[in-house]
Amino acid sequence: MPSGDTIARKLPRLVKIMRRMKLFSFLWNTGAHVAGWRHPESTDEGQHSLEFFQKVAAIAERGKMDAIFLADSVGFHRTRGAQAFACVDHVKLEPTTLLAALAATTKNIGLVGTASTSFNHPYSLARKFASLDHISHGRVGWNIVTSTGENEAHNFGLDQNYGHADRYERATEFVEVVQKLWDSWEDEALVMDKASGRYSDPSKIHGLDHDGKFYKVKGPLNIARPPQGHPVLVQAGSSGTGKAFAARFAEAIFTSHPTVDTARAFYADVKQQVAAAGRNPDMVKVMASVQPMVASTEAEARRMSDELNALVHPDLGISMLGAFLGGVDLSGEDPDGPLPAIPETENAKSTRERVLNWAKEGNLSIRELGDKIAAQRTSRNLVGTPDQIADGLADWFTGGACDGFIIGAPWLPGGLERFVDTVIPILQQRGLFRTEYEGSTLRENLGLERPENHFVRHPEDHAVPEIW
């Protein structure tokens, strides 16, 4: 019979086996590192090539990762300095278009795309993501953002962007309408009975008659309910307003923390807010952003990291720093001096606060802060051997800091391939990550429940569509 000491040693491993981490692959053009496109192994075709994204998606799927994740904006990110156009953030394929193409060449991996509530309409967005969910047989997620860029506002007829509180108020109504549109067809509404000639059941198709502060939508949607009920809702706000929004709607939360202490605090806070909102905290997966630099030895990994960081022009780092602080122009400041007084902003409040804390705690100059932002943005960097990377992920996962990770390979496709081929097998051997997909939908693989239809739960909200 095993001794009590033996059982005690095995208990942590048994706990880990019961709960497995989730992994998304962050496809930031040719790499998450701002100079990833300059890496010798980085492809030259990534900006506009379907074949490139198909290749990268196949690598992530080979590693049994939960999803690929596409960031997006609907404007041109202004940068200042001699190397302004050295930043790959300027170029992005439209996510729903790209994900539709990738749905045809993948089978199991989830497909998460970003779309703004500020510069879309609920009906057209609900239709796009419902279509993607049908096309992919239930593998789609929507990363909900409230656009912060001034150029985004200028592209949609506004002189300036919406304020922070206004953006989230609009987003709340937007998501509520989208969810009801996805539910406007009950699961059994599409009959298609050839014998009787009955195509659909009118009693199971619902109008919205929504007339709110920002949107007026009659409904119903002209497409049946998505296979997942609702595509998985992903969100990345870390401000107080952003976390409250996440607690109400999000099913996966993209968060960025350089230290385990801030990650644990965020994790505990958001889970508590989810419970206070009347939702099951287990149905919300907190995903921490990580940039892994993997090599056979720690010395080799550090050399690779240093070489990649050296490819970032200092002007670009300082320009990115200004953007992270809410659009501040630092080009006239002494790069070796401290940050000047930074005004309050309506943009990226939590990111601004994190960068200001870095500057204060580390007594960093503008140049040092710019180098730090360019190398990792506000994510966690892991540099080392496959075992060291796996240890770093395991420590956060088992230590109450997250439910999984958004893996931002520094360059693509090679950086992701190193992670998939060397780190994931170690996580699998330790029982921390799957060896096969659990289901056929993104919800099933994330361990998320399929949502009940709003109009089944609240029949009093039923409005007969004018089409009948």
Image (cartoon, rainbow, N blue to C red):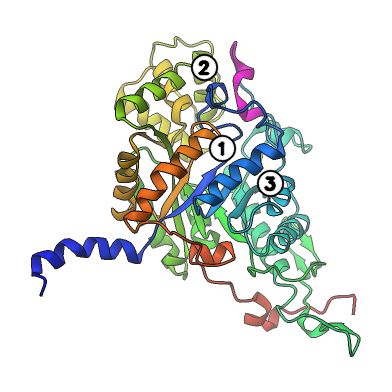
Q: Provide the residue designation for mark 3.
A: 118
Whether label 2 touches label 3, CB < 8 Å: no
Q: Is residue 383 left or right of residue 285?
A: left
Q: Amino acid at mark 3?
A: Ser
Q: Provide the residue designation for mark 2.
A: 330
Q: Nearer the viewer, mark 1 or mark 2?
A: 2
Q: Provide the residue designation for mark 1.
A: 346
Judged from the image, the secondary structure of the residue bearing numbered disc 2 is: loop
Q: Residue 182 at what x, y percent from top left?
A: 70, 67
Residue closer to the observer: 235 or 3: 3
Residue closer to the observer: 180 or 353: 180
Judged from the image, the secondary structure of the residue bearing numbered disc 3 is: loop
What distance separates the C-alpha of mark 3 from that of mark 1?
Answer: 14 Å
Q: Quadrant of residue 300?
A: top left
**Residue at point 79%, 63% (across, down):** 217
Q: Nearer the viewer, mark 3 or mark 1?
A: 3
**Of the residues under marks 3 and 1, which one precedes in the sequence?**
3
Q: Could you tell me which quadrant the C terminus lies in?
A: bottom right
Whether label 3 touches label 1, CB < 8 Å: no
Q: Amino acid at mark 2?
A: Leu
The magenta segment is 81-90
Q: Residue 135 at what x, y percent from top left?
A: 73, 60
**Residue at point 36%, 51% (across, down):** 427
Does the magenta run of residues contain 89? yes
Q: Residue 106 at what x, y percent from top left?
A: 64, 53
**Residue at point 41%, 23% (across, down):** 304
